[in-house]
Image (spheres, rainbow, N blue to C red):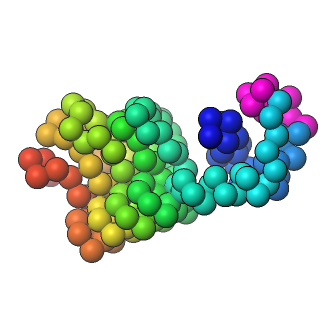
Amino acid sequence: PAVLLKIYIYGYLNRVQSSRRLEREAQRNVELMWLTGRLAPDFKTIADFRHDNGGAILAPQRAFSCNGCTFSGNSATGTGGAICATGVTAVNSTFTGNSAASNGGAIYVDNPALAKALQLANVTISGNTANGGGGISGGSPSVVVKNTIIAANTAAVGPDCRLGDDVTLHP
């Protein structure tokens, strides 16, 4: 899974979306060959990994940070349409049109009890869908949200945010 995650992230950062193209890149691109230790899975393996893990970033037991990122049109069959991580810090970023079958259309924090598990500054989260927490699911009492728009997301429970019972967001 580590090699497939590296290929997946490489593809995302370099805007290579096709599994067949990622297969070719893994066979010819020196940077990707170095990154993967010369392992080159076929396109079906890459496609299956994407389908099974969904979303753009899957980082269980890890904190994920991004600055100036755009996550759009990603989907997960489980949680976190764009990001599923133990902690998320996003700055100057946009999350639109992502979806998750379960929770967190844009962002799912898998261990919301951690202090500052969710930190957002100058972020727009809109047009995402999920069963719970159309925009965000998860977060601790010390959620940090500054200059951020979380609106027009869709979910059966918590259309924009589904945070812990002890979390309150103030405008």
Q: As rendered, which of 2 and 170 lies closer to the eye?
A: 2
Q: Is residue 161 left or right of residue 67?
A: left
Q: Which quarter of the picture shows residue 64?
A: top left
Q: Quadrant of the N terminus?
A: top right
Q: As rendered, which of 171 and 79 lies closer to the eye?
A: 79
Query: Where is 69 relative to 136, above or below?
Result: above
Q: Is residue 12 left or right of residue 68?
A: right
User: Would you say the magenta stretch is mainly helix, strand or loop?
Assistant: helix
Q: Position of residue 41 (x, y in %)?
A: 79, 45
Residue at 49%, 64% in the rendered image: 77
In the rendered image, is residue 13 in sight?
A: no
Q: Which residues are magenta?
A: 28-37
Residue at 11%, 52% in the rendered image: 165
Q: As rendered, which of 112 and 14 lies closer to the eye?
A: 112
Residue 8 on the magenta segment: no
Residue 35 on the magenta segment: yes
Query: Where is 158 relative to 24, above or below?
Result: below
Query: Where is 58 relative to 34, above or below?
Result: below
Residue at 57%, 57% in the rendered image: 52
Q: Which quarter of the picture shows residue 85?
A: top left
Q: Position of residue 95 (x, y in %)?
A: 45, 54
Q: Position of residue 90 (x, y in %)?
A: 40, 39
Given the current orientation, which residue lies at the most extreme bottom position?
156
In the rendered image, is residue 67 in sight?
A: yes
- The number of numbered badges drawn on the structure is 0
Residue at 31%, 55% in the rendered image: 136
Q: Is residue 135 left or right of residue 31?
A: left
Given the current orientation, which residue lies at the most extreme right position?
28
Q: Position of residue 99 (x, y in %)?
A: 45, 65
